[in-house]
Image: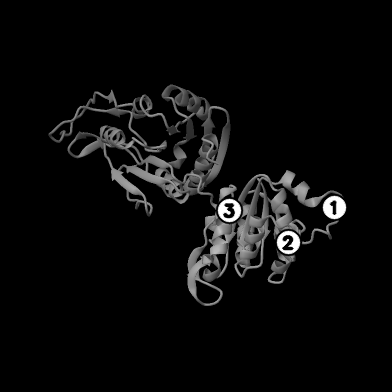
Amino acid sequence: MNIILGISSSIAIYKSCLLLRKLLGEGHQVQVIMTKNATKLISPKIFSALSGREVFVDLFSMAGTGIEHIDLARWAEVLLVAPATANIIGKFASGIADDFLSTYYLAHRKKVLIAPAMNSYMWENPVVQENIKNLKKRGNIIIKPIRGELACGEKGVGKMAEPEEIYEPKIYKGKKVLITAGATREYIDPVRFISNPSSGKMGYALAKVAKSMGAEVLLLSGKTFLKPPKGVETKYFESTEELYKLMKENIEGKDFVFMAAAVGDFKAPFSREKIKRQKNLKLMLEPTEDIIKSIRKEFKGFIFGFALETENLEERGKEKMKSKGLDGIFVNGTSAFEKDENEGILIFKNHIKNISKKEKEKVAEEILKEVGKVAKLA
């Protein structure tokens, strides 16, 4: 993504260095524009060294042959202003164009994110709040300042949001998400069951990341040693039947369902007495409820599935997605069981993406971002 990072003169400017590195680390192309006053707090050479691009400051000192702010407006997909002072916010709201950043703002026609940073008295001033209100009406996204210790030594609201909050878009804000995780257990007697080695780590990672992206998350979990992510409602199941019941009870009103649980395909008749040791014990297995197929008949939201295959991952993933009526699926091999890392193939109706081996939280981020794009959230 091509991003313009606008920087104005606030003490929070040091956070812009961290923000720039995060954006570059995710593969984005970033062009920095600074106000003249911002250059008095930190040298443009620092941002130039980090970005590998000349920093734009003065409208009349650029060496290009075109009209730079117009050329940039054609190139950029996002304008992110962080920090944004009361002064630059006032210029944006009033249509004043007396430096490179305010002039570029008027030429920009795509997404705008603004992260204010100022003293709490300034932030609470009716004029500033009216400017913020007007910017919101025009479609600008305001990343609200947070409460904390300000440059003056006082505490209040006005501190620029942390780079992680600015960088991670809340694309699931206002969305209700149901996620399943862990293995099912199909008991054959009071002490034995049929199960698999799933740890639940992938589902828990999804729940944590979805929460950080603004979703209201309900996690349905099998038995696991993991602690539920902070702020995530969690309910527990053991058997496939219990999971199916929980889903039917809780799926109403949900926008997205991620079926990361390792649901057993078979069960055996239950013996109320412990089965004694035998030389040749035969278990008559029968299929468990196909939860996804059953839920799909009534649920009209987005359903994303997970599949483990030992061969022909892409082919079998496509078959499973079609047969179960899924909107997308992630297919991996057996190497992910009980591990902190995962890798596999992300399949949608119109495109496929290979995900290289990385921590499960990073895999969860990629999955949720791709689903967000397919669902047109981002």
Q: In the image, 296: left or right of 38?
A: left
Disc 1: which residue:
64
Q: In the image, 354: left or right of 300?
A: right
Mark 2 or mark 1: name the one nearer the start of the chain: 2
Q: In the image, 183: left or right of 161?
A: left
Q: Which mark is residue 134?
A: 3
Q: Residue at x 77, y 48 (%)?
A: 70
> How far apart are the two marked residues, 2 and 1, measured between alpha carbons?
20 Å
Q: Residue at x 63, y 61 (%)?
A: 90
User: From the viewer's perspective, is the residue at label 2 or at label 1 nearer?
Assistant: 1
Disc 2: which residue:
49
| Identity, as a three-letter code, of the amino acid under mark 2 | Ala
| Identity, as a three-letter code, of the amino acid under mark 1 | Gly
Q: Which x, y percent locates residue 370?
A: 54, 39
C-beta proximity under 8 Å, tags 2 and 1? no
Label 3: few (<14), some or many (≥20) within 10 Å? some
Q: Which x, y percent locates residue 4?
A: 68, 52
Q: Nearer the viewer, residue 45 or 227?
A: 45
